[in-house]
Image: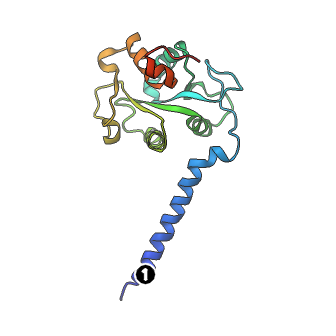
Amino acid sequence: MSVNWELVVAAISMVAGAAAAYFGYVAVRGRLRPPRSSPRTAGTTGADTSYHAFVSYAEADEATAVWLAEGLQARGLRVFLAKWIGVGLVEYAEKERALSASAHGVLLFSKASMGRADIRDEYAALLQQAHAGDRRFVPVLVDAVTLPPFARIRRPLDLTRRGGSDAALDELARAIGPPSARRSGAEPGP
């Protein structure tokens, strides 16, 4: 039985073309139609659906995620946190909208988050956005864990040594705040 290599190459090309079309659509889908409004959070209004940061975390790290998000909001940043999704909304749909509307991504790495499939999906999406444009991906160490390879190449915010310090929040706010705040070192504004 001989293999028809032309047929194999054609099939592989067809699959690659379909994948490229899908990922191309995902990359521009927010620009094709106006995005639906994202859930309100403590620092946003219903009309303002953009965020300075999307914070990804495992449920076990929720207290740290809330501390971090509230600290960033106190510094004038708009933050998306899954915990703040309103009643009756679809969590995955709201996360997807917020991810598209976020300037930067922050992922809390801990023993709890390392084995979660949903966190791996968010990690992949955050990395894709970081590579597609001028978005920053910031790994935040909550526990002493080995970061995955693409997170390891970035300098993380290490909370294992700095805990709940204001200096750690200030550093993160400067990293993900508006460009003018990053250049000047000033506190970011709304």
Colour option used: rainbow
Note whether residue 101 is visible.
yes
Q: Residue furthest bottom?
A: 1
The picture places residue 161, in percent across and down from the top left corner, at 29, 17
Callout 1 secondary element: helix
Which residue is located at x 65 percent, y 44 percent? Answer: 31
Query: Where is the C terminus found, in terms of image quarters?
Result: top right
132 and 69: which one is in front?
132
Q: As displayed, is residue 26 above or below residue 17?
A: above
Q: As displayed, is residue 10 above or below residue 118?
A: below
The picture places residue 86, in percent across and down from the top left corner, at 65, 27
Left or right placement of residue 82 versus residue 67 in this view: right
Which residue is located at x 53 percent, y 12 percent? Answer: 74
126 and 3: which one is in front?
126
**Circle 1: residue type:** Glu
Q: As displayed, is residue 32 above or below residue 137?
A: below
Query: Where is the N terminus found, in terms of image quarters?
Result: bottom left
The picture places residue 123, in percent across and down from the top left corner, at 43, 39
Note whether residue 63 is visible.
no
For disc 1, the marked residue is 6
Left or right placement of residue 143 versus residue 104 in this view: left
Say few, some or many: other residues with alpha carbon within 10 Å of mark 1 (under 14 / 14 to 19 / 20 or more): few
Residue 85, quarter of picture? top right
